[in-house]
Image (tube, helix red, strand yellow):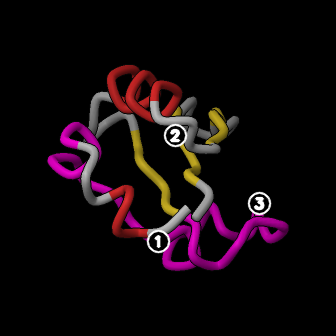
Amino acid sequence: MKWTQLNQLPTLKNSEFHYLIDTLEYELHKDRSKDSLIVYEYTSNILEISKELILNNIEFSHHISEDVELSYLIITL
């Protein structure tokens, strides 16, 4: 998946996201590409983003942090 394709998705484009490598969650997901993105439920509507990713056949995974019960998506680039 190329960033230019992701940039065309309106819901994701208008959401707050970060590169996984720039977050604390990177320690939990070192097997992921260093270019993967992360989207947190407290800053974005991850349900709408998930639907958009599924409809566009974009690989992602959903995770819940055990410490704070925080839900987030990791989007594979």
Amino acid residing under circle 3 = Leu
Mark 3 sits on what residue?
28
Q: CA distance from mark 1 to mark 3?
A: 14 Å
Q: Position of residue 58 (x, y in %)?
A: 56, 43
Examine the rendered structure and indicate whether residue 34 appears above or below residue 38: below
Q: CA distance from mark 2 to mark 3?
A: 13 Å
Mark 2 sits on what residue?
72
Q: Residue placed at 41% from the left, 69% from the top?
A: 3
Instruction: Report the span colored magenta.
Output: 10-36
Label 1: which secondary element: strand
- Mark 2 and 1 residues: CB-CB less than 8 Å, in contact? no
Q: Residue placed at 48% from the left, 55% from the top?
A: 38
Q: Which image quadrant for residue 4?
A: bottom left
Residue 20: in magenta span: yes
Mark 1 sits on what residue?
19
Label 3: which secondary element: helix
Question: In this image, 26 relative to 77: left or right?
Answer: right
Label 2: which secondary element: strand
Q: Residue placed at 51% from the left, 40% from the top?
A: 72
Which of the image's four quarters has the N terminus? bottom right
Which of the image's four quarters has the C terminus? bottom right
Q: Position of residue 29 (x, y in %)?
A: 76, 61
Between residue 56 and residue 14, name the one nearer to us. 56
Amino acid residing under circle 2 = Tyr
Residue 1: in magenta span: no
Count of labels in the image: 3
Mark 2 vs mark 1: which is more N-terminal? 1
Q: CA distance from mark 2 to mark 1?
A: 13 Å
How packed mark 3 is, by other alpha carbons closer than 10 Å (few <14, some 14-19, many 20 or more), is: few
